[in-house]
Image (tube, grey):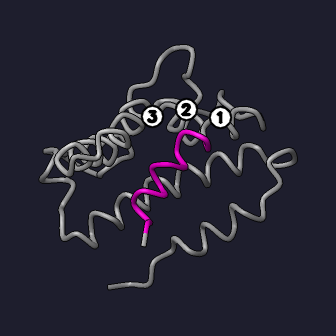
Amino acid sequence: MATSAIPNLLLEINQLNIETFPNATFDLMRTLLEKTIKMYADVLGVNIRSEVQVRGHVMLDNCLEWLEKKARADGATAIAGVIKKVKNGQLTAYVATSDHLNAINHNPLVSATPSEVRTAWNSAKPILEWMLKP
């Protein structure tokens, strides 16, 4: 298995100034979330593509769908709720949804503010902590 990029991503995101680089921070945060879920599944020996019947590339939405099912199956209903909120979101909390995370990454008309980065991080952080716990 190749060396994980997760520690480098954590180091880089920790060094970014979100006031100066909100878009770079938001994009890296989205990347960190998707890669961490994929690495978590890999460590568990799970193929996300087959678990959630994905054709083509496994994307963030697919990862969140699998992770929510895993959390519920493990009885971790609190974290499953957080994952569902990030996956589906609510209009008032759109900034923390996977749709917005994807838009920041792929849509040239969408950019992030430092406030949005903080909001999205506050939603993603418990998910990352749950997967990375010792």
What's the residue at 69%, 67% (across, down)? Answer: 12
Specify whether 110 is left or right of 133.
right
- Residue 47 screen position, x and y as percent: 18, 61
Q: Is residue 45 left or right of residue 103?
A: left
Pointer 1 residue: 119
The C terminus is located in which quarter? bottom left
Q: Which of pointers 1 and 2 lies earlier in the amino acid sequence?
A: 2
Where is 102 relative to 76, above or below? above
Q: Earlier in the sequence, mark 1 or mark 3?
A: 3
Within 10 Å of disc 2 (Cα), the crowding (few <14, some 14-19, many 20+) is many
Q: Are marks 1 and 2 in contact (CB under 8 Å)?
A: yes
Q: Which three-letter amino acid code belongs to the residue tagged 2? A: Ala
Spatial CA span between label 1 and label 2: 6 Å
Please give the count of numbered marks on the rendered protein.
3
Judging from the image, what secondary structure is the residue with disc 2 in?
A: helix
Q: Quadrant of residue 132?
A: bottom left
**19 or 53: nearer the eye?**
19
Report the magenta residues as a range.
Answer: 121-133
Instruction: Give the residue number, with chain letter if any, for mark 2.
Output: 96
Q: Which residue lies at the image location 36% right of the left edge and 33% below the top edge?
A: 84
Quarter assignment of residue 23? top right
Query: Where is mark 3, residue-wise?
Result: 86
